[in-house]
Image (cartoon, rainbow, N blue to C red):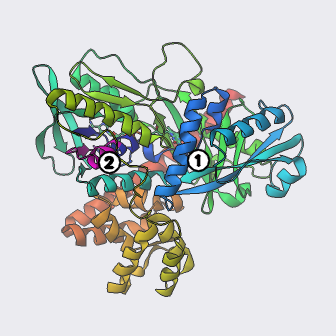
Amino acid sequence: MLVIGGGINGVGIARDAAMRGLRTVLVEQHDLGSGTSSRSSRLIHGGLRYLEQGNLRLVMEANRERRVLLRIAPHLVWPLPFIFPVHRGDRIPVWQLAAGMWLYDVLALFRNVRAHRMLGKRAVLEHEPALRKPGLVGGARYYDAQCDDARLVIATARSAITHGALVANYMEVRGLERTGGRVVGAQLEDRLTGHRAVVSAATVVNAAGAWADRIRLFEDAGATPLLQPTRGTHIAVDRTRLGHRDAIIFTSPIDGRVMFVLPWGDQSYIGTTDTDTAESPDAVAPSAEDCIYLLRSANALFPDARLGLEDIRSAWTGLRPLLADRVARAASRRSREHAIVRGAGGMLTVVGGKLTTYRPMAAEVVNRVVRELRQRDRRPLPMEARTDEEPLPGGETRDLSPFRERGIETGLPPDTVDHLVRAYGTEAAGIYNLGAADRRLFRRLAASHPAIEAEVIHAVRRELAQTVEDVLVRRLHLYYECADHGVPAARRVAELMGRELGWEEARIDEETSRYFDLVKATRAQRRQLIRGAGSATTEAE
Ligand SMILES: Cc1cc2nc3c(=O)[nH]c(=O)nc-3n(C[C@H](O)[C@H](O)[C@H](O)COP(=O)(O)OP(=O)(O)OC[C@H]3O[C@@H](n4cnc5c(N)ncnc54)[C@H](O)[C@@H]3O)c2cc1C
């Protein structure tokens, strides 16, 4: 089986298939998780807003999956308390919130981290004193979960590899191989070396997310688009500016949409927008309008914040690979559910879904593949894989305190130990071992970030990192978490990678400057955004 696309859906499918014994190859044109799967709200959630749409089945499934992911990846998925404040005149009044909260607990079979509690005005302010006081009438406190989306993708891919899958990043599908009209493989190009190759497969699964319609055109030049994407932007600011403690979910005073203010270390990120778009998935970037909308919504809820565009530390935009809805409905109300479509050449295209529910969706795709293969040549293949039982790498135990203690014993500072245990779970031990063999690898990559050099070695040896961007953006997150986007660490990262991958000096230079270029482009985008915002505000006035 060939899987196209290394987002959460592709790697989930590859893991499920490999666990059932299918010979599986996954190719990703860029880095694992570099598409929508690392540009999410980073929530593993029951989907409170789907309650409003009456989609109880989806809520129930998502609630179950939250339990599964908290169990199989406790380092990458962690419980997160939310406060839902209600102000007079909000689109969702307190009585409706109370009913929704009750139903949410019912659909979680009362097995959420903790049951919800309705709060009066005073109790809301005890939790969140920085919230706007005038008009506040009460709220609720409940639990969902937060995740490291990019690392969840990488961990899932690694689990697939452990079960025998071949996973290649920077391997682009440039066309499909056909015999008698059937898709029987794909033409590949290695984007790092330019090498080309053909891979044959009994089944091809297209899990290319927002790019899925492009792959479908390789199969059938007249294929009708399945997707009608919407764009979603998040912005991150210093957490002290908002002064919140828990995660906050609220309805935007601008248009009543449900939004989040979420904690992430010393940052808060605010999201998200949900706007119809026809832009290419290769070029999505935050727009001035998106950022202004998010800032205004947050400023209205936290009146002392007074955030402006210059306060944005980082921003990311993803395309929701939503199913086209021929019946015109508002973008944010369109179904989030997935579809599996068999194309003219027999390729299965899977679109839609959420990070939260990737596992059952993957199982459904592989069930379909197994049924087809059984029909074709009667080969005995199992109808299920216990992807819900086997932990992802690093998730072997929920009690990570021994790994924390061991980290402290090595002499690493507590913030680094916390960072390592959260990012690697039980595999933090592997990072300590690297440092024990060479103490220099315990050095920080940047003064303002807890990440250390040993992680770069781990990223190359275990996590398929191929470029400096892979390390600093999706594995260690300095790009998002440091005010300077991790630029001063780039050269050192390239040198450490070079040692592992046998890079010459020229390649080290090239990789370093490629990262500089990425950051330069980000900064230019930000400047343009601020300029664009100037004109957007003038127009609005
Ligand atoms: C703003 C936003 C917030 C979200 N928040 C949440 C959330 O909090 N919780 C949640 O559960 N869900 C959330 N989602 C939904 C979730 O992120 C997506 O449904 C999910 O990430 C889609 O995964 P995917 O694998 O289908 O797509 P992608 O992650 O985009 O993966 C597709 C991959 O295919 C690759 N590809 C494309 N063309 C080729 C080719 N020719 N050859 C090889 N590879 C190719 C791409 O490079 C890409 O990496 C959010 C979505 C958005 C946009």
348 over 391 or under it: above or below:
above
Quadrant in which ligand 1 is drawn = top left
For the C terminus, the quadrant is top right
Q: Amino acid at mark 2?
A: Arg
419 over 324 or under it: above or below:
below
Q: Residue at x 37, y 39 (%)?
A: 362
For the N terminus, the quadrant is top left
Q: Residue at x 20, y 38 (%)?
A: 380
Q: Secondary structure at mark 1?
A: strand
In the rendered structure, which disc, 2 or 1, sits on the residue that comes first in sequence? 2
Q: Nearer the viewer, residue 484 or 325?
A: 325
Label drawn at residue 15: 2
Query: Is 25 in the magenta?
Result: yes
Q: Amino acid at mark 1?
A: Ile
Q: Nearer the viewer, residue 504 or 24?
A: 24
Residues packed near mark 2 inside 10 Å, few (<14), some (14 to 19) or many (20 plus): many
Q: Which residues are magenta?
A: 13-28
Query: Residue 531 occupies which quadrant of the picture?
Result: top right
Q: Residue 256: where, in percent of width, then height?
A: 72, 30
Label drawn at residue 235: 1
Q: Residue 136: where, in percent of width, then height?
A: 87, 42
Can you tell which of label 2 and label 1 is closer to the viewer? 2
